[in-house]
Image (cartoon, rainbow, N blue to C red):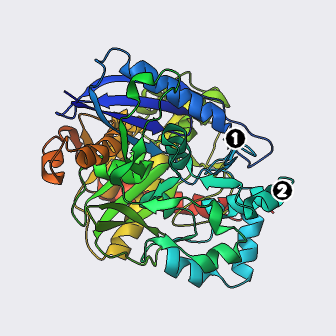
Amino acid sequence: MASYILALDQGTTSSRAIVFDRAGQIAAKAQHTFPQIYPQAGWVEHDPMTIWDTERLAAAEAIRGLPEGSIAGIGVTNQRETTIVWDKATGQPVYNAIVWQCRRTAELCEELKRQGLEERIVSTTGLLIDAYFSGTKIRWILDNIPGARQRAERGELLFGTVETWLIWRLTGQHVTDYSNASRTMLFDIHRLCWDEELCRLLRIPACMLPRPVENSAVYGTVQPGIPGLETLAGVPVCGAAGDQQAALFGQACFHPGEAKNTYGTGCFTLMNVGAEPVRSRAGLVSSVAWSVGGRTTYALEGSVFNGGSTIQWLRDELRLVDSAPECDRLAESVENSGGVVVVPAFTGLGAPYWDMYARGAILGITRGTGRAHIARAVLECIAYQVTDLMLAMRQDAGCDITALRADGGASVSDILMQMQADLLRIPVDRPTMVETTAFGAASLAGLACGLWRDTEELAALRRSQRVFLPQRPQADCDDEYRLWKKAVSRACHWAE
């Protein structure tokens, strides 16, 4: 009997595959990392074929020990906004994937602002004009790869974010789910369709765009003959969501006012706002969270470009620590950061600042500053950035958020979770099963293929591993947060 769901979790630094059983427990998993490509300062790319190969290998390894026919459905979740353009006939990419972190289209975004398009884009797509989103990345490929625009206009090229690319490789179907579509700067989140005028304004042929679909539905079945995935032939691919919306779903934030933060490469705070999108006045964006059974749920979102990647920078570039656990141990060895503040604006600042020209800074260094102070400041800067997002969210939503559900790689850090609870003055709830992004994709697929009945059944599967409560005096936290805001003001508008 088919009693498992396979979740493909394609992230910024690795491709993972996780098999879940009906109880929401992990039955098997596999992971493959892949190289990051930095052609020049501020540019970030991936090889699309490497994305596919690593995800395919991870899936093959995850299902290896399972009986044939035991996978009921497949869900896909992905690094969002990352842009791939490929040949419809051969399947060959015309250029590397331009990653969500890449800032190469910052000047094009400035030009769109000069044209007065900000209100048009915000009111239609829920997004601000920024190099973060997919639209200007597609335009860059069409403008800079010889012959690409002509081929696209002839209908020879296809665009997709990473879930579209994976679903196409698996099934041959060219689709995108509403949550990923709503991160392109081309999608009308009210009418749930591509906006033809925005496509014209950005000079993107509509024929290369995938068909928008619900987040829980059968998109196609796995084609026979895919190396390593032969036993999956005929299995439906029936759930998809961008990683952050998938995590919101996987954290069972099914009611308006419920919020989660994913402490990953970046930090992403999402709040369920219900059946109508909320227009942000505080630098956040609105997106489709998911659409299931004809009912669409929206989310407010704030994005931090560099969260856990700041710890990686401390380890790999500065070489002040050998591992993330060592960063924690160092941070715990001092009472505070000694006035040191790290602003990790390596690729600009996201919400609520949206400054593409901000750059990283370490401020407040004295002769007594040691690596323990810098390690603590690195963890603090992650918590400060999430606090920025949560305060903006409270302001926009007009209601309080009574708890924050935490997930992502850096959420394993007890000291970081405690810092977050102290700054926000609310409980921070870390689940027992932290693979919430993958479980969100699995849940959407499981609803479509009948493994789970409804969201109530899914919500009952969630368990808290630990809830962190505020401990430090609020006055101390407020003083340190004011210092953070001062430091951010120094880092803003740095690059010319």
Instruction: Answer yes or no: is residue 388 visible.
Output: no
Give how far apart the Cα atoms at labels 2 and 1 are: 21 Å
Instruction: Answer yes or no: is residue 416 visible.
Output: yes
Q: Earlier in the sequence, mark 2 or mark 1?
A: 1
Image depth: mark 2 or mark 1 in front: 1
Please tell me whether residue 288 is drawn above or below residue 277 in the rendered image.
above
Q: Quadrant of the N terminus?
A: top left
**Label 2 amino acid?**
Asn
**Residue 436: % across, % down:** 32, 41
Determine which residue is flagged by label 2.
Answer: 144
The residue carrying pointer 2 sits among few (fewer than 14), some (14 to 19) or many (20 or more) residues within 10 Å by Cα, namely few
The residue nearer to you, when weighing 356 against 233, is: 233
Task: Locate residue 314 relative to residue 44 in the image: left or right.
Answer: left
Q: Assign a secondary structure to mark 2.
A: helix
* Corner quadrant of residue 300: bottom left
Please tell me whether residue 338 is drawn above or below residue 141 in the rendered image.
above
* Corner quadrant of residue 21: top left
Residue at the (51%, 26%) spot, across then down: 225
Which of the labelled discs sits on residue 339, or is there none? none
The residue nearer to you, when weighing 337 against 292, is: 292
Residue at the (64%, 26%) spot, across then down: 319
Please tell me whether residue 458 is drawn above or below residue 480 in the rendered image.
above
The residue nearer to you, when weighing 405 against 473, is: 405
Residue at the (78%, 46%) spot, across then down: 41
The residue nearer to you, when weighing 236 against 368, is: 236
Determine which residue is flagged by label 1.
Answer: 90
Q: Assign a secondary structure to mark 1.
A: loop
**Label 1 amino acid?**
Thr
**Residue 353: % across, % down:** 57, 66
**Residue 209: % across, % down:** 59, 61
